[in-house]
Amino acid sequence: MIRVKIISRAKEIELKENKIIAEKLIRKLGFSPDEVVVVRNGEVITEDDEIYDGDFVEIIPVASGG
Amino acid sequence: MSVELTEKELERYGRQIMLFGEESQKRLKKARVIIVGVGGLGSVSSLYLAAAGVGKLILVDKERIELSNLNRQILYTTKDVGKYKVEVAARRLKELNPEIEVEGVVDEITEDNVKDYVSKVDLVVDGLDNWKTRFILNKECIRQKKPFIHAGIRGMYGQLLVVIPGKGPCLNCIIPSLPEEEKAFPVLGTTPGILGLLQATEVIKILTNYGTPAIGKLIIYDGMDLSLREIKVNRRPNCPVCGGI
């Protein structure tokens, strides 16, 4: 099970997958890879990195305003 | 070049000299900082950097003040609507601290002029509202090995990244491709206030060598549940911007 927390939507979901590519996860959640930072177990990963069963993933949007 | 502090400066900055000493205050006096964008973020960072005694501030922004800016751009008042932001900002900052030099430039940073602007200063503060210009500045700061203090905000949410070339990740390491631009974004005025203050704090730390700059940390502020989180971020070895240094 992969736990995913989406910061901007203040919600946490659980995925049954054993393994998923970060980009696939981002798209599955309705985001584009260039609008979020993906953090796996506390460290930023790239869209090509894999996420495994037992990982905790946070999806962090990046804000552009000033 | 050595600088001395006048009696007035010793009095003005007395409380922070108690904290980090006269030598650090002299480093601030010698420093030149550019703030690109004097909107919500830049209003706040520039005020505190002026108050702290950064010797020269260059403000770059091409916009005029609009009524809808005033919920967050606290350098400006209702009577300033219609005037160029940098002109009002430079005057306000000089009123706050006549000991420093403030230059306001009605301009925008482009691929063509970024080199000149960055070469004039020791450090660059991001007060922008678009990714395109941020990426231009990030790249030039890496090239000239100058610190770049990034922040971005939306609603009650914002992020901060301190880029010290060669020592930690750059903006491109964290955001590898240009995100979609958002024109009019929702924002509570306090959000750029908080992020702008964090930026000013990091600038003062870097210029004075006091404390530890937030290198390799993406700082996420979320006002919805009042949290300030620190996420460890690494350089991307294959980053096209900073991978070679």
Image (spheres, coloured by chain):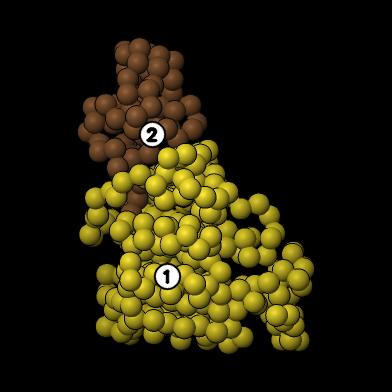
**Residue at screen point 39% across, 81% down:** B105
Residue B44, image x and y in percent? 47, 68
Query: On screen, B239 above or below A39?
Result: below
Counting the numbered discs, the total is: 2
Colour for chain B in the figure: yellow
Colour for chain A in the figure: brown
**Residue at screen point 74% across, 64% down:** B19
Report whether residue B55 is seen: yes
Is disc 2 on the same chain as disc 1? no
> Disc number at residue B217?
none
Q: Amino acid at mark 2?
A: Thr
Residue B198, image x and y in percent? 53, 57
Q: Classify mark 2: residues with Cα within 10 Å, few (<14), some (14-19) or many (20+).
A: some
Residue B95, image x and y in percent? 52, 86
Q: Classify mark 1: residues with Cα within 10 Å, few (<14), some (14-19) or many (20+).
A: some
Left-right relation of A9 to B200: left
Whether residues under marks 1 and 2 lie with C-beta atoms below 8 angstroms apart, the answer is: no
Q: Which residue is mark 1?
A: B115
Left-right relation of A41 to B107: right
Q: Which residue is mark 2?
A: A46
Circle 1 — which element?
helix
Disc 2 chain ID:
A
**Residue at screen point 51% across, 39% down:** B234
- The quadrant where residue B152 appears: bottom left
Circle 2 — which element?
loop
Quadrant showing the N terminus of chain B: bottom right
Residue B147, image x and y in percent? 53, 60
**Residue at screen point 35% across, 12% down:** A18
Query: On screen, B50 above or below A43?
Result: below
Report whether residue B191 is seen: no
Disc 1 chain ID:
B
Left-right relation of B243 to B66: right
